[in-house]
Amino acid sequence: MAQNKKDTKKNKEQNPSRIPQKITGGPERTTKSSEDKKNNFYIVGIGASAGGLEAFQQFLSHMPADSGMAFVLIQHLAATHESILTELLSKVTSMHVREVKDGMIAEPDNVYIIPPNTEMAILHSTLHLLPRPEARGQHMPIDSFLQSLAEDQGNKAIAIIMSGTGSDGSQGIRAIKAEGGIVLAQDEKSAKYAGMPHSAIATGHVDFILPPDKIAAELLRINRHPYLSLVKTDAAEELTPERDDSLSKIFILLRAATGVDFTYYKRSTIRRRIMRRMLLHKIEKIEDYIKYLRETPSEVELLYEDILINVTSFFREPETCDVLKNTVFPQIAGNASSDIPVRIWVPGCATGEEAYSIAMCILEFLGDKKITRPIQVFATDIDDAAVEKARKGIYPESISQDVSPDRLRRFFVKTEGGFQIGKPIREICIFARQNFVKDPPFSKIDLISCRNVLIYFGPELQKKALPILHYALNPGGFLMLGTSESIGEFSSLFSLLDKKNKIYSKKSSLTRLHFEQAPEDYAKEKAGSAKKPEGHVLSVGDILKKADNIVLGRYSPAGVVINDEMKIIQFRGYTSPYLEHEPGEASLNLMKMVREGLTVELRTAIHKAKKDNAAVRKEGLRIRHNKHFKDINIEVIPFKDPAAKEHFFLILFEESALQPVTESKKGLRTAKTQKQAETEEVLRLRHENAASKELLKSVTSEHEAANEELMALNEELQSSNEEMQSINEELETAKEELQSTNEELTTVNEELQNRNEEMIHINNDLLNILSGIEIPLILLGNELQIRRFNPSAGKMLNLISSDIGRPITDVRHNIDVPDLKQLILDVIDTLVIKEREIRDMDGRWYSISIKPYKTFDNRIDGVLITIVDINDIKLSSIRLKEAYDYAHSIVETVREPLVVLSAEMKVITSNHSFYDKFQITPEETENKLLYDLANNQWNIPPLRKLLEDILPKNTFISDFEINYDIPGIEQRNLLLNARQIYREENEPQMILLAIEDITERKKSEEEREKLILELKEALAKVKQLSGLLPICASCKKIRDDKGYWNQIEVYIKKHSEAEFTHGLCPECAKKSLDELEELKKRRITDKPR
């Protein structure tokens, strides 16, 4: 069932992070905590269809990454197509763009995109995915999400409608506006498809109409306005006198312009509406806004419309309609006789959906039931624009979401861009402007539907409204309220019938209830429709027009205007002598009102006028009026309404100039004259009677024949109409489905077009890269066919464009790879990259690499062959190897141990002398830290310091001596020399360490030092014995002329303990040999036998 005001829940949970801010002399400025900033932010719902991708890109590219708002993008996506919208939009914004997963929480500075084949709703800032409805017709995901967003976020909701076809979003923005949110739409000029923006703008609920880049700028301004800090407050919240004074001034301006006093309406709602208008006009102080209202009368009207903004739809709660049909309507239908109409009142009807929904419900209830009671649905509202829209009964196509196909077929007529309520429904619904708490109420009502109206009233106004509703109801009548409303303290007036649907029945009241009627000033119409001031001076044209009306009213003949069905639609002049009402049910049928004597003649004249399409005049017709007969003339003048193509007739009555003779005159006649006159009268009457009968018979026969033909034709037309209607419905449904599919295909096409443009760019980049790469590249398929190659490959392998598609093995090329086919097949089978060095016919060296070609979905679809010219590298490598071998032979020839160290002091290599000298193997040495070798014997702090300074400080080590213990051999003395090996700039740095074993040299030097010492000592002793030695003063020789040697020998033998190494003298040698011979002989003699 429709709800004619916004669907507000009384106990709706409030977000604790919101900061209540009442209207004061200026908006309160508070410092928000980090938690406030985290939770108190706008959520922007953006809807688009065809052309939406371009609009999204323009908008997001102008939106900074730290705006503090969350963006939810709803686009019509194909149900079976995987969307790449997330990928495309990620390229134009630095915000995090993500496709929504069920249960994802909306956070600031993020962009959320609806997935395909889903609808989306939001609850407590959490996004929920719902299955896409299976019903035929247009898919309306934007309306669905925006309505959810309005209910969840209230005044923190912003809606933007961008490019697209159809009207999706038009209902949703109404909900956003009703909750105090902001609505923007892309201007039609910048939209690729203007259907959706146009439909949104046509609702009158759009606040800003801008291109996408300007929408981004406007959102940033809105985000800085203090309006966001205003939140819903409790209905009982009171204002201070100063705040109340500001509102009162605005109420005065509203009352003066509209005749509606909002003093006792709910203040929190009024404040939100005022703050919203202030935001739109960039006004921050309430005093400035009051000044603006006084200077701009049109703003008062706009504020009035904002306050009255409402959310309504058809059959919003289907269960309520079922309760009415099963519980309420049966009691109403059985409570009165068949000639008393069923009277229903819908106060606060807004744009009429609620009233029309109830009318449809009661017609569905009546169905084939034999109930002939007339039905009257009175629908009232204080908003003239809403009442006028309701009276027209034209609604957008989006109502198909709320109205079933059966009801659309039965109660609506398809129009361009929407539906119109059918004439049978509109005829029973009467719309009027009324302030039901001020203006006189209706009476004798069977059902009042006052749903979600009282929630806008303050306590005082609610206390006044409920007695009025009680007064308007018949005894036992029914009152239906909104789900968040109740009768409060008036339980003595109503009894609860259905708690869930808030349906009450009227209790009888022992005392008459009193309520105030509207003061004249309050009940007046708006200023534009109010009476003109008394001092207004009529113009000359007005005076002449008024004079014409007086003349026409006094001297024009009496008459009536009727339609084809003989129904009087206008009375002109004084018609009482010619027409009279019959007792019983009221009727405006001319034949039931015409006086005696005119029925036949009048019907005949009308029939002839219609048939000949010309005026028909009859004179001397006698009628009875006030017990007297008089002769009259009638004239029937036909005319048509060109627009409606309907026939109308103007029937004029006038008295005949020859009137019947009065009774007094008859008395003066002679008997003969009287008798003759009577005979003539009888003959005239008989003739007239016969003519009338003949005419009547002819007309009746003609009428019956025509009626039969019309009935047959009507049956045929009705049958054809039903078929055409069925076909039309199928076509409409198919059209909607095609339109929806077309929108989705357009969106897919845009994405594919965007992707195609990217592929073109990528392909161009690839072609330029391939052309610019001098390395030959060949792409082969699984069948070894050539798919693509670059110019370098073509030049090297003698390939031309016509070779594409041929197997590579069929092409004569100038490289020597005899097993190329097998190499390629091995790569395809094993997925292992193959590399090989090859030569061409000229002897140049190349490196060929064969890699598997993988697709996006990880399938193997051929191989990629690259051929790199390595001739210079190969020749350099050969020369380097030769140089290495040469150097290695030299190094190995060197007897001294040599060690090459890395910058980390790890052994890179050593020569054989090193391994032999230190009895160690290459495995135990290479890539090992020098300091860890031989039980850390090389870990000498001074040595470490010297070695580690060589590379950074460019120093060297010269003749650094250490002691080293070689296992199984005595300690050795080693002399170390080291310096940097100079290499290319990007090559690793190295140190060459030379090791020299100086142990033997050390011993020789020590012996030499000992001999030198002994000699020195001997010389010293010789010097001491110089007095004993006879030496010639001239030749410096020892003299032996006086037996000096004998004296010396005796002295040395007796006194010297030194050892001499100058050999034996001949005498001692001979003596030693003799003693040795003697010893040998003894040993032979002593051997055992």
Image (cartoon, grey):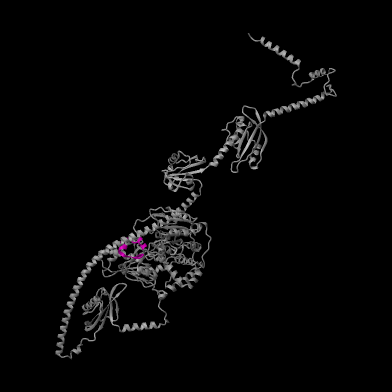
Q: Is residue 784 magenta?
A: no
- Residue 174's place in the image compared with 519, above or below, is above
Give x and y (percent) for residue 794: 47, 46
Q: Is residue 411 magenta?
A: yes
Task: Tell me: 337 left or right of 1043.
Answer: left
Give x and y (percent) for residue 179: 43, 63
Q: Is residue 556 visible?
A: yes
In the figure, residue 475 lies in which quadrant?
bottom left
Of the pair 627 and 49, the residue shown nearer to us: 49
Q: Is residue 382 visible?
A: no
Q: Which quarter of the figure is the N terminus placed in?
A: bottom left
Of the pair 412 and 668, the residue shown nearer to us: 412
In the image, which residues are magenta?
397-419
Task: Tell me: 235 left or right of 1063.
Answer: left
- Residue 760's place in the image compared with 183, above or below, is above
Give x and y (percent) for residue 498: 34, 61
Of the pair 458 and 785, the residue shown nearer to us: 785
Q: Which quarter of the figure is the C terminus placed in?
A: top right
Give x and y (percent) for residue 603: 22, 77
Residue extending farthest to the front is 842
How many labels sit on residues? Answer: 0
Task: Tell me: 618 left or right of 36.
Answer: left
